[in-house]
């Protein structure tokens, strides 16, 4: 029986509570690499191949062109997808925990409720992607997230706040310029040297976050929370901190705060 997207969303909290390695994927057809390549080779440009609710976990799919495939509810846990082309793919409610997506192309991908905990996305391109999901402890060093839509989904609040969770993620030297990551959780994340120019970060969580030498020029951080955050060497030119909460922050006196608004509480 085909499971609808809404039913999948309702089941998601149950699945998340179960460790990926021990989750029961018995209802998901297991595909091997040769079969996947065969299906992709036969796919037409007008009809993308569907891997809906298929188990592709633990496979070496490095460099594979998925040709805008439907990977909704697919399982990719532990798979090698380095350099793979996943641009424009539908990855809604999919699982890629611990997967290697280094250098992968995810431009414009639909990544709603995607589970990427502990995944390696170093150098990956997620520009223009729609992402609300789990990137806790993921490696996004030097990744491109320009113009990503990672804003919290305010239409599903009955299910709890659905937002981009990047707690303890490595975003060192990543490019998040122009991204919308309002209400995202960056707690204890490494954003040192990251470019967040013009990004929308209203109501985001930055407790314990490393923002050393980050570029936050013209960023909107209104209503965000900064506890034990390190701003040393950051460029905060014209950033908006109106209504933000500051507690035990570090390095604001060593940051460029020219034209920034709402920093009075943090500078006390």
Image (cartoon, rainbow, N blue to C red):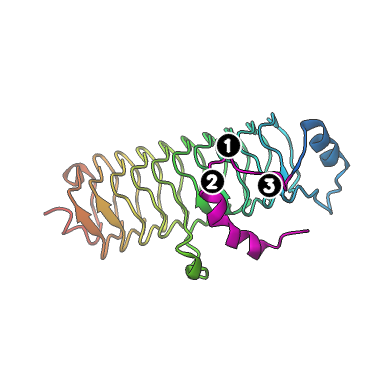
Between discs 1 and 3, the one toward the N terminus: 1
Report which residue position mark 3 lands on: 74
Asked if the magenta segment contains residue 66, the reply would be no
Quarter of the picture containing the C terminus is: bottom left
Report which residue position mark 1 lands on: 21
Q: Nearer the viewer, mark 3 or mark 2?
A: 2
User: Which secondary structure, mark 2?
Assistant: loop
User: Which secondary structure, mark 3?
Assistant: loop
User: In whole angstroms, how far apart are the C-alphas of marks 2 and 1?
Assistant: 8 Å
From the viewer's perspective, tell me whether residue 134 is left or right of residue 30.
left
In the rendered image, residue 14, in percent from the top left (x then y), is placed at: 55, 54
From the viewer's perspective, tell me whether residue 30 is left or right of residue 185.
right
Quick one: 136 or 40, which is closer to the camera?
A: 136
User: In whole angstroms, how far apart are the C-alphas of marks 3 and 2?
Assistant: 16 Å
Quick one: 156 or 242, which is closer to the camera?
A: 156
Is residue 210 visible to us here?
A: yes
Q: Do labels 1 and 3 touch, CB within 8 Å? A: no
Q: Residue at x 64, y 31 (%)?
A: 80
Q: Residue at x 50, y 64 (%)?
A: 153
| Quadrant assignment, res 65 | top right
90 to 4, vertically: above or below: above
Q: Residue at x 72, y 60 (%)?
A: 3
In the rendered image, residue 186, in percent from the top left (x then y), is placed at: 38, 48
Is residue 128 visible to us here?
A: no
Q: Nearer the viewer, mark 1 or mark 3?
A: 1
Local crowd size for mark 3, using a 10 Å CA cut-off: few (<14), some (14–19), many (≥20): many
Quarter of the picture containing the N terminus is: bottom right
Report which residue position mark 2 lands on: 18
Asked if the magenta segment contains residue 9, the reply would be yes
User: In whole angstroms, how far apart are the C-alphas of marks 1 and 3?
Assistant: 15 Å
In the rendered image, residue 28, in percent from the top left (x then y), is placed at: 73, 46
């Amino acid at each position: 029986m085909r499971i609808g997207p809404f039913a999948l969303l309702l089941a998601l909290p149950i699945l998340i509570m179960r460790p990926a390695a021990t989750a029961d994927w018995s209802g998901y057809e297991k595909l091997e690499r040769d079969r996947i390549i065969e299906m992709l080779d036969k796919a037409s440009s007008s009809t993308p191949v569907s891997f809906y609710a298929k188990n592709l976990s633990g496979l070496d799919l490095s460099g594979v062109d998925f040709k805008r495939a439907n990977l909704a509810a697919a399982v990719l846990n532990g798979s090698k997808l380095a350099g793979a082309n996943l641009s424009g793919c539908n990855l809604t409610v999919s699982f890629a925990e611990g997967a290697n997506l280094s250098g992968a192309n995810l431009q414009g991908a639909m990544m709603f409720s995607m589970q990427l905990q502990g995944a390696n996305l170093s150098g990956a391109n997620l520009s223009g992607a729609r992402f609300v999901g789990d990137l806790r402890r993921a490696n996004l060093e030097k990744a491109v997230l320009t113009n990503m839509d990672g804003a919290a989904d305010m239409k599903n609040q009955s299910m709890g706040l659905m937002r981009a969770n990047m707690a303890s993620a490595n975003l060192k030297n990543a490019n998040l310029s122009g991204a919308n990551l309002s209400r995202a959780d960056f707690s204890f994340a490494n954003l040192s040297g990251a470019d967040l120019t013009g990004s929308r970060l209203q109501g985001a969580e930055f407790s314990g976050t490393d923002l050393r030498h980050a570029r936050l020029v013209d960023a909107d951080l209104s209503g965000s929370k900064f506890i034990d955050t390190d701003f040393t060497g950051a460029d905060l030119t014209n950033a908006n901190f109106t209504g933000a909460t500051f507690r035990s922050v570090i390095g604001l006196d060593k940051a460029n705060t020219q034209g920034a608004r709402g920093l009075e509480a943090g500078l006390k």
